[in-house]
Image (tube, rainbow, N blue to C red):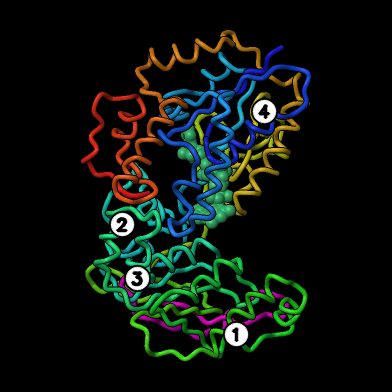
Amino acid sequence: MKLRLAIVGAGPAGIYAADILLKQERAFDVSIDLFERLPAPYGLVRYGVAPDHPRIKGIINALRDVLDRGDIRIFGNVNFGTDVTLDDLKQHYHAVIFSTGAVRDAPLGIEGVDLDGSYGAADFVNWFDGHPDVPRTWPLEAREIAVLGNGNVALDVARMLVKHPEDLLPTEIPDNVYDGLAASPVTDVHVFGRRGPAQVKFTPLELRELGELRDVDMILHDEDFDYDDASKAAVASNKQVMVIDRVLQAWRKRETGSASRRLHLHFYAKPLGLVDDGTGKVSAFRYERTRPDGEGGVEGTGEIREIPIQAFYRAVGYFGSPLDGVPFDEEHGVIPNHEGQVLHSESNEIVPGVYATGWIKRGPVGLIGHTKSDAMETISHLVSDQSNWWSPSHPDEESVEALLTERGVRFTTLDGWHRLDEHELSLGTERGRERVKVVPREEMVEVSLGGADPVVDAPTVDA
Ligand SMILES: Cc1cc2nc3c(=O)[nH]c(=O)nc-3n(C[C@H](O)[C@H](O)[C@H](O)COP(=O)(O)OP(=O)(O)OC[C@H]3O[C@@H](n4cnc5c(N)ncnc54)[C@H](O)[C@@H]3O)c2cc1C
């Protein structure tokens, strides 16, 4: 018996799932096809992790080692839902694992969120990481900017906005991003969180980085540090909170006033809305001051404040997207599942042959490493669930390529990825950089397919 498995989404979750299954002791052979909508693998590691986090980007090396073993086929530039459907997969595979992640911003229901100058973090991240499907330019005209959120993505966004672009040059920052940031007149970036310093979701490493930014003052406010008992207990009992508190307390003691840019951290701020300047543009952020409710949460104080800004970024979480023919939980933006085994939305019954892993399984929280344990759980169900697998009419490997070719899908392969990867690396060598990322999708595909003369002068950007 040979299990023909389709995995949709070549981010870390999909790649780890394939790797774990191949290494697992099992009573059957396995043949895996990985479908990815982009011509390049690695999901948010390539298109989410900030360019000035080379250590994290380095995880790509481990993922590349898995793909380079050559026992997983990749079909890149193939979108599930349009290029292949669930019915197609049922004809060619015994089962499918969806690992499509979460690639868009969670909605935020505040007044004025659709005004000009109000942006989602995911869109900005896509821009600064050179995603092929987003515009190459980003409006950076604001002097004062608010970033809403107290997680690591909020810190990435705030850091990329406030950091002097010359300090990003040694990193993988794309050229068009450098040019955009270099023209930014920003002086003040304000990060807002609803709760207190002892309840943030930042990790200490990411937070500490802010304090190391050149020519940027960290501004904190005494009123946010009058801890209630629950906050004091959190600082005393949780090592991560303790370190975060220590970092913040050290910043409070720093001399400020000489830097040309400032990064303000505001706590206990519940967003109310964005103020229209009369022409449809953001002119201020309005919020209600909150206070600890004694149980680790917060309650409103009724005190309304406004701060002038010309741009607003919401970093309030990512959100999964529904997939054709696959159950979807609209409230949480995930595929409903029990430990990776997909369930019908209403009946909660198992959907035979369909599994999920990564952010689309458990929601957009957690680090890349967490997708590994996720994958282990999903794979253990897949392996012990043979009676629920599909019975494909065309399980042979060739028929999938034939289907895509017949449909005119310009799919790329592992060899194609190697070609694109080498091309990007060689462009980097020419420029004295590690890599120059190819951005336009068509050019990525051309290079991958071994196009006679890839247009290297077309808008390529450093990765
Ligand atoms: C801004 C940001 C910064 C982060 N920084 C860090 C960090 O520094 N360190 C860390 O450990 N973690 C970080 N993370 C978290 C990390 O990126 C995630 O934990 C991880 O990427 C989730 O993996 P995944 O495979 O589930 O999803 P993804 O990485 O999103 O991969 C999903 C893949 O599925 C593909 N796909 C989606 N829909 C389809 C479709 N219809 N057909 C075919 N393919 C499809 C996508 O193109 C993508 O390649 C960060 C996340 C964000 C958003």
Residue 175: mark? none
Q: Mark 4 or mark 1, which has the lower sequence index?
A: 1
Q: Mark 2 or mark 1, which has the lower sequence index?
A: 2
Near mark 4 (Cα within 10 A), the count class, few <14, some 14-19 or many ≥20, is some
The reply to whether the magenta stretch includes residue 289 is yes
CA distance separating discs 2 and 4: 44 Å
Q: Residue at x 25, y 60 (%)?
A: 179
CA distance separating discs 3 and 1: 25 Å
Q: Residue at x 26, y 54 (%)?
A: 137
Tag 1 residue: 249
Label 3 SS: loop
Tag 2 residue: 177
Q: Is residue 252 left or right of residue 263?
A: right
Quarter of the picture holding the N terminus: top right
Label 2 SS: helix
Label 4 SS: strand
